[in-house]
Image (cartoon, rainbow, N blue to C red):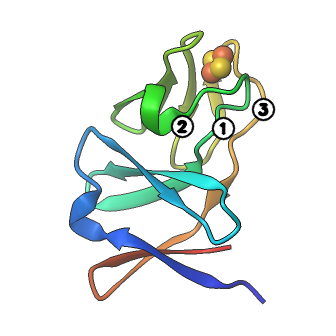
Amino acid sequence: MPETVVLCGVDEVAEGEIKQASLPDGAHVALYRVGDAIYATADTCTHGEASLSEEGMLTGKTVECTFHFGTFDVTTGEPTGMPCEIPLKTYPVKVIDDQVCIEV
Ligand code: FES
């Protein structure tokens, strides 16, 4: 059974910024606002040990990892620019009572 985890208030995920949040197991996720929707991925780049919430730059639905300039589509987790080749794990996001929740 997936567990629903409340991460933060919806207004804490600002346009153009990347919000880091923690899961109960200590793993970090990165939250992104794209238009009116919020997306969640694993926070660690699949190419190296970069934290996307700390080192990434969000443009539209693309996050660029500034370590080696690889990119991902945050809505799908798919890599869109070298050297990233492995997709980011994504999490389904639900907004409940203005709280950002994901299923883990
Ligand atoms: S660590 Fe992210 S592109 Fe290399």
Quarter of the image with the N terminus is bottom right
Q: Earlier in the sequence, mark 2 or mark 3?
A: 2
> Marks 2 and 3, how far apart in space?
12 Å
Mark number for residue 73? 2
Q: Is residue 88 above or below residue 37?
A: above
Q: Position of residue 81 (x, y in %)?
A: 61, 17
Q: Earlier in the sequence, mark 2 or mark 1?
A: 2
In the rendered image, is residue 82 in sight?
yes
Judging by the rendered image, the residue that carries numbered circle 3 is 86
Pointer 1 local density, CA inside 10 Å: few below 14, some 14–19, many at least 20: some
> Marks 1 and 3, how far apart in space?
7 Å
Q: Residue at x 51, y 43 (%)?
A: 74
Q: Is residue 2 above or below residue 76?
A: below
Left or right, 4 with reference to 97: right
Pointer 2 local density, CA inside 10 Å: few below 14, some 14–19, many at least 20: many
Q: Position of residue 71 (x, y in %)?
A: 56, 23
> Marks 2 and 1, how far apart in space?
5 Å
Tag 2: residue type? Answer: Asp
